[in-house]
Amino acid sequence: MSVGQGRAVPPQVVVPVHNAPGLVADCLDALARTLPPEGTVQVVDDASSDPAVAALLAGHPLLRRDGVRVHRQTANLGFVGTVNAAVARAPGDVVLLNSDTRVTAGWLQRLVACAGSDPAIASATPWSNNAEICSLPDWCRGNPAPADADAVAAALAAAGPPAYPALPTAVGFCMYLRRAAWDQVGGFDAATFGRGYGEENDWCLRASAFGWRHVLCDDAYVVHVGGASFAGTGHRPGGAQLERLCARYPHYNALIADFIRSDPLAARRQALLADPALAAALRP
């Protein structure tokens, strides 16, 4: 957590929203169920064209809680611009949460504990069914969402002390961002990455150059639908975005390939998946 004027400031959860009201409703429902009393949330509607989004944000019970605010943008800024504006409004550390996620019991408290374990941590990413290098049970692929995600979270929390292993980059579906790193490194690069994809990898590599670390919060779990953030826009990962990333960091592909090849998370995954309770909970 950030520290200001002698008191700890809890991270603010930032949820960028653009259309997909059904997924947004699921995301807000999960937040309403799991957000601790001191938690704060900033929901940012990036000029959604679906009128159901406005109706949802006007009536959802989460948005009647103290510390939960909605910002409606009159013009579409895209994910990168929306996040930069939202972080500028936040008082300290933030947790970026895609609107196609479903958080689980204890998720935020565990991310806070992870970030608090080392002041050099710039970002922390939880396990998920669909989060590339942070995926369970099958690594580097999209897995079906489990039938009982809270049971997965409970099994992870009961599996012994977390190790918080190092990552080469955060995964943007859910990432804790330390304000001190954001202030030093700067925000996401909207000029290069436009509407989105690749911006969190670029940010993490910029932070790493300053000595910051990125870790897996290996006792937290968040469901991720995936592929919904830019649904209907024709915007996809890879392609020009990856070319821009690799032009700036020629070593990027080798960095990720080496991480996947050496698989430093293998022992941790295998130990977790050997737990019958977790293996059963992960079933769709």
Image (spheres, rainbow, N blue to C red):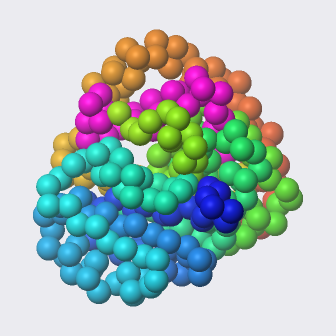
**Location of residue 93 by image quarter:** bottom right
> Is residue 244 something one can see in this rendering?
yes
Vertical placement of residue 195 versus 96, above or below: above
Q: How many tags in the picture?
A: 0
Q: Residue at x 49, y 80 (%)?
A: 32
Q: Nearer the viewer, residue 187 or 127?
A: 187
Residue 164 highlighted magenta (yes or no): no
Q: Is residue 125 left or right of residue 48?
A: right
Report x, y in % for residue 77: 21, 49
> Is residue 143 something one can see in this rendering?
no
Which quadrant does the N terminus fall into? bottom right
Vertical placement of residue 256 versus 110, above or below: above
* Outermost front residue: 5
Q: Residue at x 45, y 69 (%)?
A: 41
Vertical placement of residue 122 versus 93, above or below: above
Residue 191 highlighted magenta (yes or no): yes
Q: Residue at x 19, y 43 (%)?
A: 234
Q: Is residue 280 left or right of residue 226?
A: right
Report x, y in % for residue 84: 36, 47
Q: Is residue 186 left or right of residue 44?
A: right
Which quadrant does the C terminus fall into? bottom right
Q: Residue at x 47, y 55 (%)?
A: 96
**Location of residue 89 by image quarter:** bottom left
Vertical placement of residue 209 versus 180, above or below: above
Magenta stretch in the rendered image: 190-216
Report x, y in % for residue 59: 29, 86
Report x, y in % for residue 211: 65, 27
Q: Is residue 69 left or right of residue 140?
A: left
